[in-house]
Amino acid sequence: MHLVTQFYQWKMARKIVRDHQIDIVHEPAPVSPKQPSMMFALGVPVVIGPMNGGMSFPPAFYYMASRFERGMYGVLRMFSSIYNILIPGKLFASVLLVANRRTNNALPFFKSGKVIELVENGIFLSKVRFDVSVAGEADSINVLYVGRLIDLKAIDIVIDALSRCRNQKVRLTIVGDGLERTRLEKYAQSVAPGKVRFLGAVPHAEISDCYDNANIFVLPSLRECGGAVVLEAMARGLPVIATNWGGPADYVTGETGILVDPISREYMVNEFARSIDQLASSAELRLKYGKAALERVSKDFLWEDKAETIIRLYQSTL
C-alpha cells in the first residue's frame, strides 16, 4: 500500500512541478528512515523528513519485542539499503532531515544529499502556570502521565513506584486509553489503592487543564521515538521524570528533569519512586526544573522557529 500510494504521489508531483513552476519538493512522511521514497526524477531538489526511528527496546527489556520482530529485524535492516537503491528517493534527495543521531544511523547506507538534524516534534507556547505550591504546603502532589495505555509505555512501573513513595501526598493521574487500561486499573487498585486516577481519553482542547493540575510529569516508556507529551509538559513549566531512552532523552536535560536509565524493571521502579519523592518534597526544586524546562522549549522547540529553519533550508538548498 505504501508503494501504491507513493506511485500516485510521484505522478501527481511530476505534474504539479511541471504545471505550477514548483522550485522544491518536501516529503515529510512517512517518518521511518527505512521506508523507500519515490520522490526522485522530479527535476527539482527534494527534501525528505524529519524522520524518526531506528530504535529498539533497551537491552534489559528486549524480551518485549515480538517474536516476528526479533526474527526479522536484522533481515529487514540488511535489505533496507537494497530496496532504497531500487526505489532511490532517499539516494538522490538533496536533504535528509533526521530527528537524532540514532535515526541518522538507521538511514540507508547509500545517500548523496546532506543529512541535517531537526527534531520532528515542537510546541506552541501558551499561558504558562508555574507550580503554585511554592508559597505554602500543598494538600497533594499530582503526578501526571499522558499517552496511550499499551505495554511498551510501561505504566505499571510508575504505578509500582507510586506504591513505594514515602510521601503519602503523592497521587497519579493517568490520561489516555488503550488495550492495557482494564489490566492497569485492576493492578493499580491492588498495589496502590486510592492513589491512581484514570481519566481515559481527554479532548485535546482540554488537555491543558490536566497539565495545569499537575506538579510532576512522568513518561516511563521503553520505546518512544518522539514523546511530544514531554515537550507539552515542559512548555507548561512541569519537571519531567522519563526513561533515558529514545525521544525523551533528546528533550530532557539534567537542568529540566530527571532521566532514569532502563537498567532493569526493579531499578526503574526504585528510581522513579526516589525521583518522585525528591520532587514531591521540594516545591522550590520543582519550580527550578520547571523554569529551566520552559526556557529550553522556548529556545529549541517552538514551531514558529522550526518553520523559519525550514524556510532557510529551502533557500540554501535552492
Image (spheres, grey):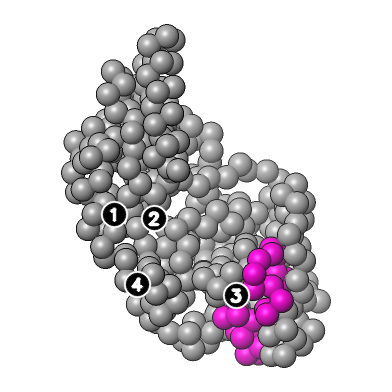
Question: What type is the residue that disc 3 sits on?
Answer: Ile
Which residue bears the numbered disc 3?
155
Which residue bears the numbered disc 1?
106
Residue 70 disc label = 4
- Marks 2 and 1, how far apart in space? 8 Å
- Marks 4 and 2, how far apart in space? 16 Å
Residue 312: percent from the left, percent from the top?
A: 38, 26
Q: Is residue 138 left or right of residue 291?
A: right
Q: Where does the magenta region start and end?
A: 156-184
- Tell me the quarter of the image containing the C terminus: top left
User: Closer to the observer: label 4 or label 2?
Assistant: 4
User: Closer to the observer: label 3 or label 4?
Assistant: 4
- Marks 1 and 4, how far apart in space? 17 Å
What element does badge 4 sit on? helix
Q: What's the residue at 39%, 55% (across, down)? A: 53
- Marks 3 and 4, how far apart in space? 23 Å
Which residue bears the numbered disc 2?
53
Labels 2 & 1 near each other (Cβ < 8 A): yes
Mark 3 and mark 4 lie on one chain; the one further toward the N terminus is: 4
Labels 3 & 2 near each other (Cβ < 8 A): no
Question: What type is the residue that disc 1 sits on?
Answer: Ala
Mark 1 and mark 3 lie on one chain; the one further toward the N terminus is: 1
Most foreground residue, 307 or 68? 68
